[in-house]
Amino acid sequence: MPVAVPTLRPWVPPAETKADVEWANLRTIDLSKFDSPDADEREFVYESFKTAVFEDGFLYLVNFGLTQAEIDEQFAIAQNALIDSKITPEEKERLEWKYLNTGKYTGYKPKGYWDIAKGVKDNVESFNYYSETMCDGDHLPVCLRSHIDKIAHFNQYCHDVINRKLLSLLSRMLELPENYLWDAVQSHNGVIGEGYFRQMMFHPVSENDRKKAAVQMHGHQDYGVTTLLLSQPIAALQVLAKDGQWRYVKYKPGGMIVNLGEVLEFLSGGHLPATRHRVTQCPPDQANEYRLTIGLFTAAKNEVSLAPLTDSPLLAREGYVSRFEPGSEGIVDATKIPTAEEWRVARVLRSQTPPEDIVEVKGVKFNRQYFKGIYVLEPI
Ligand SMILES: [Fe+2]
């Protein structure tokens, strides 16, 4: 007999801020036009997407094929688990993530894990899934097990339909066959390949801590292939623009925010940039609200080398920036260039480590990482 799925408290988006903040002027891509029978509309999608990637590295997606009810349901599931605190203390303890042992963010992250400023701990709880845990079982809290089919279906659609279209556009930007990145780079094992799905909730921050810490999550780039984030109203996500200014990402009801990860920046030799972003304190009129975010971080196949794709006519014609420098052997041995899996694990393990070896190349600052006999330059 089928088990009844518990009814969820509907998610009601918090009110948008009325504060006069500086918004990023991001472009919006109507993904329903990706498959349009009208060639001009398809071309418009490609040209808009290309400009957004080159100019901002961040964009909004709308009309990507999920209903508002399906989107709201994902927020309601996360709200139930994190804001309504239905994950039990026993589950929190048993399922707490152990990323330093595994190189993966699997499971529950309690708040107060990291120092974000002197005397201020982070205020974020999250639950993270990989393909192998996106199924029913004791690895999930009971409150999430009841909804795992909905969670898996949502992720499968985002990964296999939305993300695949994005990779097609990105392959075209590299002047490669449209299935290139999907076939040769993206991991497909399980529901979301080697990527992960995160339900995350920022607690309201006390007035005292808001004064001491301007930022809740320091500036960073995502390390995977693409990031797909459901848009939500609390103004705290900021992107770093080409002019060096941080600007807020505005709420796009029913929309999705997309940015690229370091894998694409490495493979494209810098043509497909992984744009820096951070999470600040929200404006005062939203300070008492919970900030719920839902995101899929897609990943490359484990064995993919992060060496630039020199087969790309774009790289061949316009050149590229290699992020790999010789170590003590004096050469960049191709076998030493990290694979996607090696980079992913390294990035997870040092996720809270500040840059240690800052170098400047052609006016751009990098954090130089020693890696298996070569140096990897990571933009900071
Ligand atoms: Fe991020």
Image: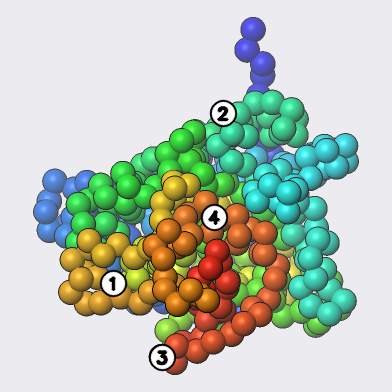
Determine whether label 3 and label 2 are within 8 Å by CB.
no
Residue 51 badge: 1
Q: Which of disc 2 and disc 3 is earlier in sequence? A: 2
Q: To which residue does mark 4 refer? A: 342
> Amino acid type of disc 2?
Asp
| Number of marks | 4
**Residue 275 at x, y percent in the picture:** 46, 72
Determine whether label 1 and label 3 are within 8 Å by CB.
no
Determine whether label 1 and label 2 are within 8 Å by CB.
no
Q: Is residue 330 above or below residue 9?
A: below
Q: Which callout, 4 or 3, points to the residue nearer the camera?
A: 4
Q: Which of disc 3 and disc 4 is earlier in sequence? A: 4
Determine whether label 4 and label 2 are within 8 Å by CB.
no
Q: To which residue does mark 3 refer? A: 362
**Residue 364 at x, y percent in the picture:** 46, 87
Q: Is residue 284 above or below residue 102?
A: below
**Quarter of image, res 283:** bottom right
> Amino acid type of disc 3?
Lys
> Amino acid type of disc 4?
Glu
